[in-house]
Image: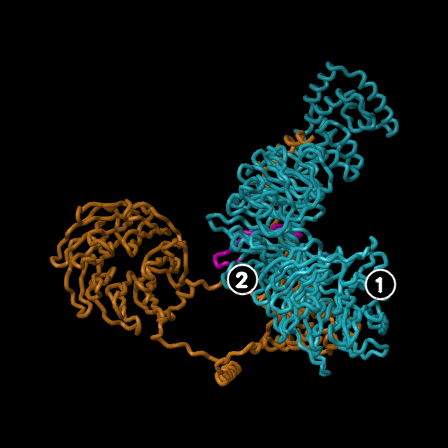
Chain colours: A orange, B cyan
Amino acid sequence: MGTFKPLNTKVFTKAEPELSDEAIYWKKFTAPAILKDFGPIDYIDVNPNDPYHFAVTCSVRVQIFNPVTKAVYKSLTRFKETAYGGKFRHDGKLICAGGDEAEVKLFDVGSKNLLRIFKGHDGPVHRCFFCINNSQLFSCSDDKSAAVWDIASEKIVAQYRDHTDYVRAGAVSPVSADIVVSGSYDKKVMMFDTRTNEVALTLDHGAPVESVIFNKTGSIIISAGGTDICFWDALAGGKLLSRITPHHKTITCLAMASDGLRLLSGGLDKRVRVTDMTDLQPAHVLNYPSPILSIGIESNDKVLAVGMVDGLVSVSRKIEEDGKGKTPRIRYTLREWRKREQKLREFEPLQEADTTFTEKERQMMSNIDRYLRSYRYSKALDVAMAMYNTKRKAESVVTLLQELIRRKGLATALAGKDDHEIAKILKFFSKHIGNFEYMPTLIDATNTLIDIYGEEINDMPMALDACNNLLSTIHDEEQLTVKLLELQGAMEMLKIASDSHKLAPNSKNDYSVTTEEFPSTL
Amino acid sequence: MITTQEELKLKRVAGGSITEHRPLFSSDSLYIYIIWDDGVRQYSIKTGKFVQKLETPNEVVELLSDPEDKNLLHGFTSAGELLTWKQDTGFFENKKTLALKLSSEKKIVGLHLSSNKNAVVVVEDTEKQIHKFIKYNLNTNEKENLPVIGQVGKFSSSVGSSDKDEYLATIHVYNLRVVNLNSSEKFKHTVNPEWGSFSCVRSHPKQNLIATCDQSGRILIWRDVMSFQAIKTLHHWHKLPVNDVVFTGQASSFYSGGSETVIVKWWLDGSQSRDFITNTGASIKNMAISPDNKYVAVGMADNAIHVVNSQMDIEQTIQHVSTHFEERPGVKPIVSRMSFDPRTKALVVNGRSGHVQFYSVENQSYMFLVDVVGQNYLNQQRGLDMVNTEVVLTAMSSDGNWFATVEERDDGLSHLECRLKFWSWDWQHKFKLKTSIENPHQGRVNDIAFQPVLGDGVNRLISTGMNAKFITWCKSEDSLWTLEFVGKLDNLVPRPVEFSNDTSLYAVGFEGTLSVWETSAMEMKSCLTRPDASERINFVKFGNNASSRYLVAASSSKIVIWDLILLQVVKIIGLKVAWLAANPMNDHMAAFTEGGELVVFLPSEKAPIYRKSILGGKKVSSALYWPHDEVQSNAVGWQRLAQLYFMTDNQEIFTFVSKNEENRDFFNPVEFPNNEGKTATPLAAFVAKQTLSQVKKVEPLPMWKQQVNSYQGSYLKMMCETPSHMLPPMQMLVGELINEYLTAQSSTIEKPQEFFKAPEPMEVIEGSSTDSESEEEGSKVRQKRRKAKTKKLRPVEESTLQSVAKLQFDWVEMLFDAVEITSDEE
């Protein structure tokens, strides 16, 4: 009330999707740094302890990077053949990795020493994990078996040969040292209990399983394979809780983020999808340049590293929000700065008074609005045209024209212009009259202009020229419209032909309606 | 299933102007009194809240404060009663009926009080179209006709006082007349007619000052009016006629307002300086000033009273149902359809120009306005027809999260502006604009409907438009609405659209054809046309609960109920439906007729549940069922689950209450006599209106149709009336036709001859060809033969004929073509 509503130029601008809270959260990461390696990035694991080094397993080595400097911190190269699945121990001091040598190797991160070699598998070992008691290892191998090892003695504690194809995925329970899960190319996910040495659960995923993880509390097993992600209840006998299909190509890796509230999944469709674990709804998408093979993320999202097929690793860190970081500098315009200074100077504590009055804020408005408000339409149009000449913002001119039509002020605004100005306006019309959003307004405006200058235009050489231009533009537009209509007609004919084919049984139905109901109305 | 016809009463829930009369401030300037509905209401200025209601026996036309006792408040009624209340307690003090003895063409329209117990009653002479004034002494009851006249108008007279005398100032066209109330001395001042006639007059209560306004927007301040040489000063800012002015107590300034939607404060210190409140959004109807000069109450055309302080800030607003007003002469204001917002429990309907208001029925209070168009209100200008963008359609999604509006501006000169907007609920902003679609239908939008939101969370809206298409809009992932599907049926213009409760189907009424579409596949399931599809379908509703299989379509003369499973017409009810509402809680439907009847019925039942002429001449512009939070056990059976509300074309909201729930609210119900005088039982009335003959009488039929109509055999009639696209293949028609004809022929011998023009087949059966004969001869022969044949035919012959007809189809088909051609020619 009491305020002048400024022109709304948004009418003609494209709608942009609104930023959700989730999108804002994921935008708070630093710009990704790209590291290049030789082969496909098989596995990435982030050290859960500060400074969150991350281990990238690729070709014949496991490299440990510093997430801040992005420099190689340690490089474990004692592999003769390709290494797979380099995984930190929970304290980050040891690292284990499998490989084509059919062995699991245990390294000390600090000294890069090879501490243990676990031999016993007959095929390449793709995934290996530390159990939560830190004294055992779990490995998954292409010999169709999964094994649990005692670290101290380098001996197999248990070996499970229940799978019928390569075992390429696995996970250890975050709550129990005795529960391990493996996922295989035989489309099955199996849960083993080392206390009974038996398969506790067999879950049918329906596609070769590429990745298996537990949720934070160990109650849900999440398996990925094909384009599906399945959520299984680990406690209630492996009930399938939900199945989602966030990707349209094979999902290769899974990771829990945001302290267990989000699930990240990477796929060959070059996307990392963020899924809300509370309602399993898609929350966000991160795009990458290549198909994704591996994701490493710190459990509180401090570091995110994504490995791709062509050896690229994209690393980004979350920006700290608390006061420790930089405070954003407020940039004042000169006007705002003066106002602020004045306020500071004038500030006095309020005395008790019968009535207090506050100074009225003056409404800020553009020049166009100011002239519109005071009914100076011609001036408003001049300003808009001048702005168009410098900024090429057609929408502000068109909205002004529309508002002038609304206010019945267009004739006033267009009257009394000289040859040059009219030519400019006509030029604007002929340039934009083809835009279907602007067209109704511009047609109305052209009509008004012709009403005013119809007779004088012969004495205005530039305007006459522009007018002829406009005429030919309109002619071209008409031609185009006719052509498009012809095309539409042809397309519609095809569509109707296919529709009538489909509708045939229905039309018979209609007939029975009318004949049956008719006698009843009499 | 006829429940007892309980006595229902019409009850006004909201609406009605509060700015018809000037408001009055209390003597302590803390409260304001306004006249609304059937009483005087007191509002607090600090909080803007309703304080109390002062009951009145008749309509109050003027509120006055007592010139002597500051604690007294007077109300003057149209029956000539002067009511007195105490301001501090609100207690009724006394009532004095003025002995005026007026003739029937005169009615009381106002009262002025002067200090010495003299009252001036303003009487409108409806025959001569002038105001007359009667001086009435309240102590002695003496009365005297004053020798002045005033023009008809709200503020065409005013009482003021000079140093010793009191005077009455009146305006009449170009004349300002002043009469001394003590000596009856008269003065007349005339202005130059080129400025137009006077529009209002107001005198200062204490000083010898009069302000007059004229049609050209000038304000003249007259001093020393009790002489023939009055001094006048001119104040000209307004471009349009000024509606009211008011002086401040010490006459240092005055306020004025008119259709410019600007409140102007003028200073009388000779500086001609002015202060403004601009863009108030509605024109100003009247003004009143508080005794301490702190506030001015400004009555607005949109049914709001703004309390403006002396710094020209609007300090408080008292708002009743915000009405859409139209300043253009001869243009009716738009009343959009009501919808129900489940989140705020509000009725949603358009308010002042370009706005949609949310009105809480439970609290009987206005909640908030949403500025839909986002444009400045354009006031009328001299010689220009200013057209504002108006909200014409609103729809609210069933969960209250989404709200859609259609706004339109059509000035007849430039292109039609039409916008479809989607708003989402937002805690901070109430409703936030998410998507705006320019010109969705390259013309007017006829109807919009949201798909009810079920568990799957799909948000969809269908709009129908004059471009003979309907469009389904769907919410995308990022909360933007985009086009999903465009549907059409031939080139018929779709109008009503409605989703079924389970969202699996939706129905679109294309002129007289009803089409049912499947939501999931966006495919037309069936196309329902009645043979007399000429009437446009205005309302479509799906049945709920037990009546889910029924689809109810209402046109201007009847309701047709379809069975969606059998695809058959179940029932036709002859009603001139003005509005059709469906109860969301059960399967009741309510139809309001043009004749002021309310009919509540079940699609599945033969008889209506409730039928009564109850609307008392009110024009229904929309109606809806409002779900109760809990079952209202004392309500009428069909209102137990949901209350039926309707809105009239002047934005008053009414509902129906029974005797035992009258006291549910503090508002008194308004009774309207059943002026239709129909005492027939509901069923009898129902049957009477259902006859087909009444429907047919409406328009004279073309010749061939008349013939077909009079021909009792229904099959031929059906063939002629059924749209051609719905006719079965020819082979299937002919056998039936012959059968039909033969039976009709044998049973209706006494039928008049001229109706048997079509039956060429008969002649052919007799073996002769009419092709070569001239027309006259042919007809003679035909008549002869017909006579002969009708006599000759016996049952045996007939049966043989039938069997022959059944056998030989191919030649009959040819003949049928001939019949078609002749009927086309006619």
Residue ID at (49%, 85%): A345
Residue B562 badge: none
Residue B443 is at least partly visible in this image: no
Check chain identity for marks 2 and 1: say if they share one. yes
Residue ID at (71%, 29%): B714
| CA–CA distance in space, label 2 to label 1 | 60 Å
Q: For mark 2, what is the residue?
A: B432
Q: Left or right of A58: which side holds B593?
A: right
Residue ID at (33%, 56%): A252
Residue A304 is at least partly visible in this image: yes
Quadrant where the N terminus of chain A lies?
bottom right
Residue B145 badge: 1
Q: Is residue B475 magenta?
A: yes
SS category of the residue bearing label 1: strand
SS category of the residue bearing label 2: strand
Residue ID at (29%, 60%): A42
Q: Left or right of B658: which side holds B706?
A: right
Instruction: Looking at this view, name the residue that lies furthest to the left.
Output: A153
Q: Is residue B296 magenta?
A: no
- Sequence-wise first label, 2 or 1: 1
Counting from the top left corner in percent of width and height, residue A307 is at 32, 63
Q: Is residue B470 above or below residue B761?
A: below
Counting from the top left corner in percent of width and height, residue B742 is at 73, 22
Quadrant where the C terminus of chain A lies?
top right
Query: How crowded is the residue under tag 1: few (<14 C-alpha within 10 Å), some, or many (20+)?
Result: few
Of residue A333 and residue A215, the one placed in the foreground of this image is: A333
Q: Left or right of A512: which side holds B802?
A: right
The residue type indicated by label 1 comes to: Asn
The stretch of residues the image draws in magenta is B460-480
Counting from the top left corner in percent of width and height, residue A354 is at 55, 77
Query: Total marks drawn?
Result: 2
